[in-house]
């Protein structure tokens, strides 16, 4: 596979910038989405191989877009600043392959990405 | 200053460090908020600038703009200091700069390290001040990483030929013991009612132990090293200094010797200070310089009183033979006062020093040990060949006799006492000698008077008994 495309979703601009920089350094193509509209646009129009969705700051509509990822068989990880049972359940229900708690440990993130691609 | 020693920019601290810092090493400056860590660092850089050295200030807390005012008060040229400002900007507060996706250790460490390496390699500074190293803790994922990073960072800076001073912001939650182990020297600043500085580690050098007084003034930090009498010595002739009043000199079998400590003790208003001044008047006649530290009375009061008892204090001052220094006790620490006395003795060659009075000095000592400080100061003066006069006020006017109220008699080589006597309903005064280490002395008391013609001392009071009780009786009449 040539440079897999990863969709990075985050409403915090600095978070998105740092995540994209890191993924670029690791040799991935990155599409940045900082709104649900951009998220939906990417899912519908791009050949996304993996999505990293930071749900912090989004409302419940974010889960609708996650369902679209599942329908298109695009694996995705949910990123959150806190770990709760409800979040765990919602993530699994909407098709997430896992939940990562921020701040992310770079080594773990890389292992997860490689495992899912 | 020896070859590999460099000045901290604070002469008192250089003295505590036995000649300054050893170059090419790293030193930790620790202390709470407001203790003067940054000020000390600025002095260190200023000393480098004065030597035409290249200096670098790496700030991780205060911005350069904030530092500006501190630097201005020290009278430093901002242009001469190279700054590497790694403090957070106000933009960081805005949404665009805040992040939580990765830890600061993952995000900030590399760019920060790159900036430092670039700056150090460009400037090749001989002195670097880092304020505060503890900020690097947030760039490390754990304590092991922090230790490793700081060690390698310091090694990098030292390999570039710099002498490094770095601060720590220690607290109970984040102690800085690890940084103390990593540095070649540890200087601790403290502010607990009194400002102090203490050196607890200095690889390859001796240093003066203990807490030394510190003052933060408009022009920066001043350190007053604790007085160590043993390290100061001056050659002098152990001769007697006469008072100029034959009867007093007879009492003392010649006078008071140079390099001795004399306590002049007695109740209020009996003439203790005047007696001390009499020795100084005689010394001035020989061309010697004396100094009086007045803790209680004002300069003017002393001058007027002297003039009223035929001691020409004004003329003595004008001729440089006397210095009256009024001391506000609560403004001075014992170390600071000792430093003042040292200056006078070492630079102005004073031969008689009078402290008027011990109770005033006691106020400046406050929580510290009076006996310890007075002992150190007196012994220092003794080693320098100075005749020390300590004025001690007794609270009781008459009654059972005690030489002093505060147990300091052991310091004295000589004790001269003045007493009020009630003789046939009249209040009179007597002088006597209680102790004299260097020679014999007259064991009888003599009547003592102070008038506008000066001090007048009578014949020995051999016909009175019960003098020390203050109500003597004639043995024969």
Image: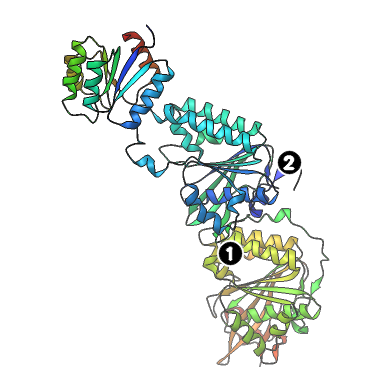
Q: Dot 1 falls on which chain?
A: B
Q: Nearer the viewer, residue A1 or B205?
A: A1
Residue A5: % across, % down: 33, 14
Nearest-to-viewer mark from 2 and 1: 2
Seen from this angle, which residue lies furthest top?
A: A1
Q: Nearer the viewer, residue B319 or B1?
A: B1
Residue B328: % across, % down: 55, 70
Q: Secondary structure at mark 1?
A: loop
Direction from residue B211 to residue A61 in the image, left or right: left
**Residue behind mark 2:** B4
Q: Residues within 10 Å of mark 1 (few under 14, many from 20)?
A: few
Direction from residue B265 to residue A65 in the image, left or right: left
**Residue behind mark 1:** B407
Q: Tell which circle, 2 or 1, labels the residue nearer the N-terminal end.
A: 2
Dot 2 and dot 1 residues touching (CB under 8 Å) = no
Q: Quadrant of residue B364?
A: bottom right
Question: Eyeballing the image, is B207 above or below B334?
Answer: above
Q: Residues within 10 Å of mark 2 (few under 14, many from 20)?
A: few
Q: Quadrant of residue A90?
A: top left
Quadrant occupied by the C terminus of chain B: bottom right
Question: Eyeballing the image, is A117 above or below B218?
Answer: above
Rendered residue at 32%/25% (across/down): A102
Rendered residue at 62%/36% (across/down): B122
Question: Eyeballing the image, is A61 above or below A115?
Answer: below
Disc 2 versus disc 1: distance between alpha carbons? 47 Å
Q: Secondary structure at mark 2?
A: loop
Residue B459: % across, % down: 73, 87
Colour scheme shown = rainbow
Residue B430: % across, % down: 65, 83
The circle drawn on residue B472 is none
Q: Is residue A5 visible?
A: yes
Q: Dot 2 falls on which chain?
A: B
């Amino acid at each position: 596979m040539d440079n897999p495309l990863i969709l990075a979703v985050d409403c915090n601009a600095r978070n998105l910038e740092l995540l994209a920089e890191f993924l670029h350094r690791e040799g991935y193509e990155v599409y940045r989405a900082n709104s649900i509209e951009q998220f939906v646009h990417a899912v519908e129009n791009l050949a996304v191989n993996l999505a990293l969705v930071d749900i912090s700051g989004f409302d419940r509509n974010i889960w609708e877009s996650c369902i679209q990822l599942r329908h298109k068989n695009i694996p995705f990880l949910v990123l959150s600043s806190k770990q709760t049972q409800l979040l765990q359940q919602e993530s699994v229900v909407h098709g997430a392959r896992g939940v990562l708690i921020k701040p992310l440990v770079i080594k773990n993130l890389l292992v997860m990405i490689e495992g899912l691609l | 200053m020896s070859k590999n020693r460099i000045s901290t920019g604070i002469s008192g601290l250089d003295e505590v460090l036995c000649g300054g810092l050893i170059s090419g090493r790293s030193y930790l400056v620790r202390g709470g908020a407001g203790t003067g860590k940054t000020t000390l660092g600025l002095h260190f850089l200023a000393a480098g600038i004065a030597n035409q050295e290249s200096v670098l200030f790496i700030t991780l807390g205060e911005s350069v703009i904030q530092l500006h005012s501190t630097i201005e008060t020290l009278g430093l040229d901002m242009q001469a200091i190279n700054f590497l400002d790694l403090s957070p900007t106000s933009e960081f507060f805005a949404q665009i700069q805040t992040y939580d996706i990765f830890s600061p250790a993952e995000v900030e460490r590399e760019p920060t390290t790159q900036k430092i390496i670039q700056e150090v390699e460009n400037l090749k500074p001989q002195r670097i001040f880092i304020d505060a190293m503890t900020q690097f803790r947030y760039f490390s994922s754990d304590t092991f990483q922090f230790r490793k990073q700081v060690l390698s960072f310091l090694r990098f800076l030292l390999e570039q030929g710099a002498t490094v001073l770095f601060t720590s912001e220690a607290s109970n939650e984040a102690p800085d013991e690890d940084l103390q182990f990593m540095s070649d020297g540890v200087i601790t600043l403290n502010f607990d009612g009194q400002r102090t500085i203490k050196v607890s580690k200095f690889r390859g050098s001796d240093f003066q132990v203990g807490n030394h007084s510190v003052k933060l003034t408009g022009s920066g930090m001043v350190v007053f090293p604790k007085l160590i009498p043993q390290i100061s010595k001056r050659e002098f002739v152990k001769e007697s200094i006469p008072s100029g009043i034959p009867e007093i000199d007879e009492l003392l079998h010649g006078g008071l010797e140079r390099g001795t400590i004399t306590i002049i003790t007695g109740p209020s208003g009996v003439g203790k200070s005047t007696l001390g001044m009499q020795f100084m008047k005689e010394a001035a006649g020989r061309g010697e310089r004396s100094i009086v530290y007045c803790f209680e009375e004002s300069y003017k009061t002393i001058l007027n009183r002297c003039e009223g008892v035929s001691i020409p204090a004004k003329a003595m001052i004008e001729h440089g033979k006397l210095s009256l220094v009024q001391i506000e006790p609560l403004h001075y620490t014992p170390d600071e006062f000792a430093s003042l006395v040292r200056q006078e003795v070492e630079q102005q060659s004073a031969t008689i020093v009078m402290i008027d009075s011990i109770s005033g000095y006691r106020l400046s000592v406050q929580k510290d040990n009076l006996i310890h400080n007075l002992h150190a100061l007196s012994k220092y003066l003794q080693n320098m060949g100075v005749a020390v006069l300590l004025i001690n006020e007794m609270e009781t006017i008459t009654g059972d006799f005690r030489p002093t109220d505060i147990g300091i008699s052991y310091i004295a080589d000589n004790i001269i006492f003045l007493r009020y006597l009630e003789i046939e309903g009249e209040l009179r005064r007597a002088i006597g000698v209680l102790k004299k280490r260097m020679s014999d002395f007259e064991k009888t008391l003599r009547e003592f008077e102070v008038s506008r013609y000066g001090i007048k001392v009578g014949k020995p009071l051999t016909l009175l008994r019960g003098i020390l009780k203050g109500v003597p009786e004639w043995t024969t009449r």
